[in-house]
Amino acid sequence: MELKETVQMMGSSDYKERFMAEYLQLNKNDWFK
């Protein structure tokens, strides 16, 4: 999944979708490592 694919999720009114999008962005970019 790419960053552009999470944009719609980040704009969701559902906090669960926003949280998942944020997790996917962080996981994809390996910011935690």
Image: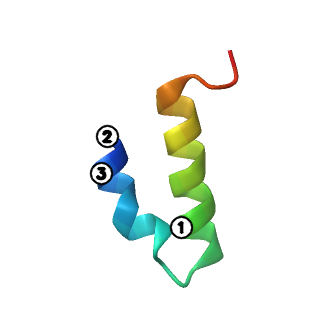
Helix, strand or loop at mark 3: helix
Is disc 3 in contact with disc 2, using a CB cutoff of under 8 Å? Answer: yes
Q: Earlier in the sequence, mark 3 or mark 1?
A: 3
Q: Nearer the viewer, mark 3 or mark 1?
A: 3
**Three-letter code, disc 1:** Glu
**Between discs 2 and 1, the one toward the N terminus:** 2
Pair 2/1: label in front: 2
Q: Secondary structure at mark 2?
A: loop
Badge 3 crowding class, 10 Å Cα cut-off, few under 14, some 14 to 19, many 20 or more, is few
Mark 1 element type? helix
In the rendered structure, the answer to whether residue 23 lies left or right of residue 28 reads right
Q: Which mark is residue 2?
A: 2
3 and 1 marks in contact (CB < 8 Å): no
How packed mark 1 is, by other alpha carbons closer than 10 Å (few <14, some 14-19, many 20 or more), is some
Going by the numbered disc 2, the residue's amino acid type is: Glu
Q: Of residues 3 and 24, which is closer to you in this image?
A: 3
Q: Dividing the image into 4 quarters, which one contains the N terminus?
A: top left
CA distance for labels 3 and 1 = 15 Å
Q: CA distance from mark 3 to mark 2?
A: 5 Å
The residue at which mark 3 appears reads as 4
Which percent across, then down, holds residue 32? Answer: 70, 24
| Residue type at tag 3 | Lys
Residue at the image point whose x is 53% and y is 67% from the top: 17
Outermost residue to the bottom:
13
Q: Is residue 9 left or right of residue 22?
A: left
Q: Mark 2 and mark 1: span between their CA atoms?
A: 15 Å
Quarter of the figure that contains the C terminus: top right
Q: Is residue 24 above or below residue 7?
A: above
Is 16 rendered above or below residue 14? above
Residue in view at x 57 percent, y 22 percent: 30
Would you name the residue on which mark 1 appears? 17
Q: In the image, residue 6 lies at what x, y percent? A: 39, 55
